[in-house]
Amino acid sequence: MERADPEALAELEDVPNAIRSQVKDHSSGHFYWKGKSLTHLHVDPSGVHADAKIGVEWVRRRVTFQSEKTDFFALI
């Protein structure tokens, strides 16, 4: 699974924009909270996925559809 490129991020503009409103975006699609990696986006044939660090664990969620995005925002 590769990191989401700028084209993929543009298609999902609402995801990065919603995250940017709360945390710092050091590089396209990689977000930090208080200096620590919080989440980043990936693309594969099944859609766009977000990895989020919850406590000490990384959790992956698909964020292709609105309901998935809503669930992801609630998670982080």
Image (tube, rainbow, N blue to C red):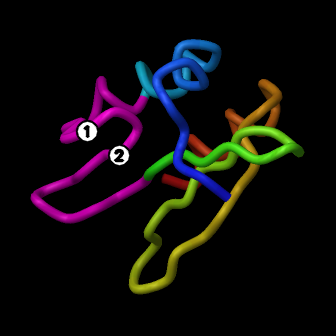
Circles 2 and 1 in contact, beta carbons < 8 Å: yes
Q: Residue 30 carries which label?
A: 2
> Quick check: 29 above or below 34?
above
Marking on residue 27? 1
> Is residue 21 a member of the stretch shown in magenta?
yes
Residue at the far left: name it. Answer: 35
Image: 55 above or below 48: below
Q: Residue furthest right?
A: 46
* 28 displayed left or right of 73: left
Task: Please give the label number shown on residue 53.
Answer: none
Residue 20 is situated, as x and y percent measured from the top left of the image, at: 31, 28
Amino acid residing under circle 1? Ser
Say which residue appears at 56% left-offset and 41% top-offset.
73
Q: In this view, does 73 lie to the left or right of 28?
A: right
| Highlighted range, magenta | 19-39
Tell me which amino acid carries mark 2: His
